[in-house]
Image: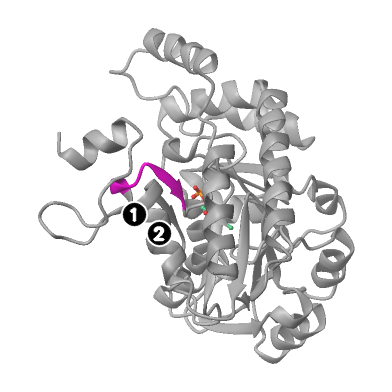
Amino acid sequence: MSSTQKNVAQGKPAAHANQSGAQASVADFAHRLQWNENPYDFPADLKAIVMERWAEYAWARYPTEIRPAALLTALADHAGVTPENVTAAGGSCALIQLTLRAFLEPGDGIVLPAPTFGLYGREARKLHAQVEEVALSPADDYALPVDDLLLRGRQSRARLIALCAPNNPTGTVYTADELRRLIGGTDAVVAVDEAYREFCGQDLRPLLDEFENLILLRTFSKAYAMAGLRVGYALGAPRLIQAMDNLNPLFPLPVFSALAAEVALAHTPRFLARVDDIVAERERMAAALGNLPGVTLFSSGTNFLLLQFDRDPAPILDGLKREHSVIVSDMAGYPELVNCLRISVGLPQENDWVVEAVGKFCEG
Ligand SMILES: Cc1ncc(COP(=O)(O)O)c(C=O)c1O
């Protein structure tokens, strides 16, 4: 074990660069507030249930069905739909790829708000789709430009419009009425990524009763604290789900991950109680950070906050890494987000360190 790994294991600050002098990697930091993970691990007693079921399973055997039928049925019950309305895959990253591949041919238009989760644009470009970005504006707290999205969709004859509700990396919540206007105003398929839905308490599932061109993408990575197990699912009209499932590999989920998702789903209230804790911490941080000089805090219905500073916030990043082994996101991959930091809501102690570091920077 390297000294950095030992420090991390003991919860001590790690060095900024590792011993070989190479650039520090995520694994070098004990406190990871850069990827919007859940700071509370999957509960130990529920892990024990998963392990027990897993131990009973004959590893030598393929799953009895090519799709994780028990999980799909549980997901359908949970969402109040039929199994024909659901498919599952290895995280919403895999579902995003399935969505793009199912509904885009080379040259087809896809409309995306910008900034949004980078995978959409990157993967669409790989498919040689025509990516049409509609700018969100910090001046109106990154509100959803429904008319502009629809107009761009018409102009480019887009086959797909994709957005995240709430949005990553801005944190913005979009109301069901705004989305209704968007989905109802186009013939394109609209993919709405609900990765953070539990943190804003909004359930867009009723929109599925109104629209045949809507796909909802969901994940077990955030509220259910299962990012390492890679489980996501999509809800939509059978025609759309079938088109995605045709591209889904056989046995899309490892048995272990499917079992864990079943156990998690059956204990949803436990996870939602943790979500409440995270939301309370988010609001505590927002209250502490919102009125500092030289910083704009954007509204968030997620498990992270986006802050924009009037100057380069690198000293905050450096100080947090050096003093507390905390890593936050500098948003370097997003040209629109100059001088911004995106900070996942962590454990109370981690959040205190962030509040202190930002306060010192702004008032120093
Ligand atoms: C909006 C959004 N969608 C999808 C993902 C990927 O989630 P998953 O872990 O399910 O692949 C993320 C991850 O941060 C995200 O922010």
Q: Position of residue 324 (x, y in %)?
A: 40, 47
Q: Amino acid at mark 2?
A: Gly
Which secondary structure, mark 2? Answer: helix
Q: Tell me if mark 2 has few (under 14), some (14-19) or many (20+) residues whose alpha carbon lies within 10 angstroms of its own.
A: some
Q: Position of residue 11 (x, y in %)?
A: 36, 34
Residue at x-position 84% and y-position 61%? 175
Residue at point 74% right, 29% down?
A: 77
Q: Compared to 159, does 90 lie above or below?
A: above
Q: Check disc 1: other Cα within 10 Å, few if <14, some if 14-19, many if 20+.
A: some
Are the residues at dot 2 and dot 1 in contact (C-beta closer than 8 Å)?
Answer: yes
Residue drawn at point x = 54 percent, y = 72 percent? 340
Visible residue check, residue 363: yes
Does 31 lie within the magenta span?
yes
In the figure, 138 relative to 94: above or below? below
Residue position marked by numbered label 1 in the rendering:
322
Q: Residue 224: horizontal and vertical position, in percent?
A: 59, 34
Q: Is residue 161 left or right of residue 147?
A: left
In magenta, the rendered stretch is: 27-33
Residue type at mark 1? Arg
Residue sitting nearer the eye, 185 or 276: 276
Which residue is denoted by mark 2 in the rendering? 319
Placement of the N terminus among the 4 image quadrants: top left
